[in-house]
Amino acid sequence: LSKAMPRKSNSSHMPYTDLTRVSSTFNRSLRIIHSATAKKPSKIVVGDQSGTVTCFKYIKEIYTVFQQTKDQPITALTLDDDRIIVAYGQTIQAIKKKGKVLTTFNLSLSEDVTSLQAKNDTIWCCGEYVYNCYKNEK
């Protein structure tokens, strides 16, 4: 966490502030959980290539809501109602917004999940060559 520091660009000086740092990430592995009211802060969830899922919020300083480490890189992350759906390797995991693991299921795929979307009890996931749809984890 650092103070606002100017960053040089080609056309002008753009100030920025580091809130927190994570490892490098894949596309579609950062989401914002909007709060129910305007007075509560939104949360930010990010999954990185070191296999860490971090959820934090900012109220004058950074507060980590939860942090979990997996054994493979987080390749996709999406939100559905009050769940965070995470894909790593051939595994999909549902996590509550406070960090409790709801369910974990392994897919019978020959490739890693690279893209993920969820709605209610249906999860759509894609690899490089394969597309699958799971309803009630089946």
Image: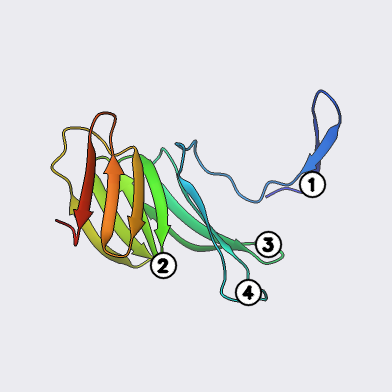
The residue carrying mark 3 is: 61
Rendered position, 131 above or below 91: above
Q: Are marks 1 and 3 in contact (CB under 8 Å)?
A: no
Rendered position, 111 above or below 16: above
The residue carrying mark 1 is: 4
Residue that appears at 20% across and 58% down: 135
Between the C-alphas of marks 2 and 1, the distance is 34 Å
Between the C-alphas of marks 3 and 2, the distance is 26 Å
Residue that appears at 40% across and 39% down: 50
For residue 119, side relative to residue 33 (left or right)? left
For residue 71, side relative to residue 16 (left or right)? left
Q: Residue 30 location in percent, x, y?
A: 50, 48
What secondary structure is found at the residue carrying circle 1?
A: loop
What secondary structure is found at the residue carrying circle 3?
A: loop
The residue carrying mark 2 is: 81
Of labels 3 and 2, earlier in sequence is 3
Question: Within 10 angstroms of label 4, few (less than 14), some, or many (20 or more) residues?
Answer: few
Question: Within 10 angstroms of label 1, few (less than 14), some, or many (20 or more) residues?
Answer: few
Q: Amino acid at mark 3?
A: Glu
Between the C-alphas of marks 1 and 3, the distance is 13 Å
